[in-house]
Image (cartoon, rainbow, N blue to C red):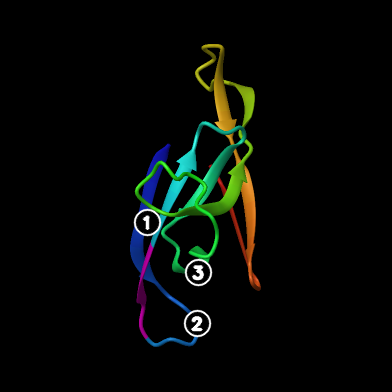
Amino acid sequence: VLMYEERGMMNLDGLGKPVEAYRKYCFNTAKWPVEVYFVDDPTKKDLQTLLPELDCHTSFFVPLPFSDGTRADKADLGTSQCSRACFEHLCVEDLYSGEL
């Protein structure tokens, strides 16, 4: 597993000043496609943890279906492997999307 933490200031419409935001994720690379879990999300504590061997609570967020492909190298040195994953997550009325 890979643990990932985000911290920063978030600007929301209607609020006069930014608010501090924090989120921690777990990337479960033992699954394919790789699964991303929320870590210690207080709104998900009623769900069974997905990785009980960890010292934290984990709940499902999104799968990351990486696709393998080749692309031509700009320096014309042949081809190189690249992978990318796109995801979407509907949270109440907000749609989050991303690409790795």
Residue with the mark numbered 1: 6
The answer to whether residue 41 is above or below residue 19 is above
The amino acid type found where label 2 is placed reads: Asp
Nearer the viewer's eye, disc 1 or disc 2? 1
The amino acid type found where label 3 is placed reads: Thr
- Predominant secondary structure in magenta? strand
User: Element type at marker 1?
Assistant: strand
Q: Kindly identify which numbered label has been placed on residue 66.
A: none
Residue with the mark numbered 2: 13
Picture coordinates of residue 99 (x, y %)?
A: 57, 46
Residue with the mark numbered 3: 43
- How crowded pointer 3 is (Cα within 10 Å; few <14, some 14-19, many 20+) is rated as few
Q: Which quadrant holds the N terminus? A: top left
Do the residues bearing badges 1 and 2 touch, measured as CB atoms within 8 Å? no
User: Element type at marker 3?
Assistant: helix
Picture coordinates of residue 5 (x, y %)?
A: 36, 52
The amino acid type found where label 1 is placed reads: Glu
- How crowded pointer 1 is (Cα within 10 Å; few <14, some 14-19, many 20+) is rated as few
Q: Which residues are magenta?
A: 17-22
The answer to whether residue 34 is above or below residue 71 is below
Cα distance in 3D space between marks 1 and 3: 18 Å
